[in-house]
Image (spheres, rainbow, N blue to C red):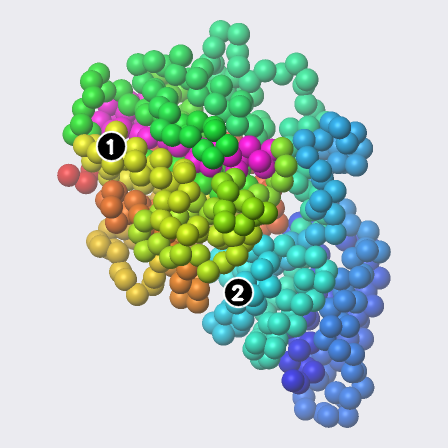
Amino acid sequence: MKLISNLVVLNCLLSAATTAFTIDSLANPFNNVQKALQINFNNDNNNQEETFTPTYETYANQFLDSLESANFKTTSDDNEFHHWSSIATEELPFDIQQYVDRYVIRLHNWDSDKTREAILLSSHELGLDIWETSMVHKFVDVQVTKLQAVKLFKLIMNRYESARFELNLMIHDLPQTIFETLPIASKTSDENETVFGDDGFDASAVEIFFKKYRDLNTIYSWFDLLEQTYPELLTVERIGQTFEGRDIKALRLTAHKNDNKNAKTVVITGGIHAREWISVSSACYILSRFLQDYEAGKKKVTYFLKNLDFLFMPVMNPDGYDYTWNNDRLWRKNRQETYNPRCFGIDIDHSFDYHFTKSQESSCSEDYAGEGAFESLESHAWDKYLNETRHDHPMYGYIDLHSYAQEVLYPYAYTCEQAPRDKENLLELAYGLSQSIRLNSGKNYGVLSACEDKGADLLPSMGAGSALDYMYHNKAHWAFVMKLRDSGSHGFLLPPKYIAPVGKEIYASIKYFAGFVLSDD
């Protein structure tokens, strides 16, 4: 293997600062390496190449070791959050120490499909936690230890020695970044603050509710309060139970005076992956804004609610979501038993019965799909509810909220070889959703097929059994996954100050979606 082919890929490590943090001072031991790389890459002087001979592993280790002595300053205002180490252990909801010496790196701007393939396949081979892949923005974010990072770099180059890509340290202080998503982290927290007004649900209560992420019990209590406040509009339905005995709740929102079975239904789900808190808060925000705007007499919203049924499932994975609040902030799956007594959890979004693929992954894997379709209790309950309780109600729209990457994905996820029906209108609607967000907040959401996003062209099982494909093929005329903010430095750990801004832009897109559905007669 050529030395230069191995080293050039790490060239961007020499400037480690990203939008996630700034470097106050970092003695860069690699200036000579950078010069050598530039010289050797631009000419074929063999004598010069021989002047620099450390191994690839040594180089990667030197960079990662330099992080220990770097003086990093997070972008957070020091007056905004406590540091997690200043909080008594018994006051923390879970062990923050478990994330020490873990990092999130971004491999991006690859030069070819072969390089992308090498990155994805190498990450999967090592069993790493791939946070996100984005074809729109050309990045793969991976959580690693230092040793795992070195193994990953080496495996990528062994798989394709001509690979060229850029590499950034996305999250350096993972424990603190996780901590700052918790309500306890804020220095401005009011211990006497209540998310429920004395007189029920009002504007001030709404504002307070969306200042922070909320745990499952608070969200479920909020559902009950909404139902009590708007009994003529909202019904909370219990559609099943999880493995740990929690209710799975759906909320029906409509202004119909009777059960109009001819009304078109729009379904909005969130939280299918437990750690994606912004998807849960956004689904709740959309529900809240519909109620507020209807009460305020907004003509467009009144028209929507009188002519459509909305079904919300803001927390599609109650066990997993609760687990992220009390045990592991980065948990993804549900908490169901598997054949391995030491490994819990099924990826609900791989367990639906449309091109389901029995998992080849270990049951410990983040992507474990289970041994059969609808093995996850959540997807089974959802299927039963749609086929029995809601069987006669025509479903025209499905929006599945996820994070992150700022993308609108259309079917199919399981393959790129099968074109969706009415692809032209699907694309029109997808770009309309993206444009409505851009007009609201200025944020750009890319549009592409879910199969490209999930890497189904490389690993077919990664797109198999998805809720998107199941709903599109069996139920809904129009179906999309919307991957919310951000595409930058936070990943799943979007600070709570973004809850309302993200909610507002997604609410704008849902109103556009509702208008499209009603115009399609």
Q: Secondary structure at mark 1?
A: helix
User: Which of the 4 quarters of the picture holds residue 156?
Assistant: bottom right
Q: Residue at x 72, y 62 (%)?
A: 147
Residue beneath the point at 49% across and 7% down: 199
Using a 10 Å C-alpha cutoff, classify the residue at mark 2 as few (fewer than 14 neighbours), some (14 to 19) or many (20 or more): many
Q: What is the chief secondary structure element of the magenta stretch?
A: helix
The disc labelled 2 sits on which kind of residue?
Leu
Depth check: 87 or 385 in front? Answer: 385
Q: Are marks 1 and 2 in contact (CB under 8 Å)?
A: no
Q: What's drawn in magenta, residue-wise?
A: 298-325
Foreground residue among 303 and 470: 470
Assign a secondary structure to mark 2: helix
Q: Is residue 431 left or right of residue 194?
A: left
- Amino acid at the residue labelled 1: Glu
| Residue under pointer 1 | 388
- Separation of marks 1 and 2 at Cα, in angstroms: 40 Å
For disc 1, the neighbor class at 10 Å (few under 14, some 14 to 19, many from 20) is few
Vertical placement of residue 232 versus 336, above or below: above
The residue lying at 62 percent from left, 16 percent from top is 193
Mark 1, mark 2: which one is toward the viewer?
A: 1
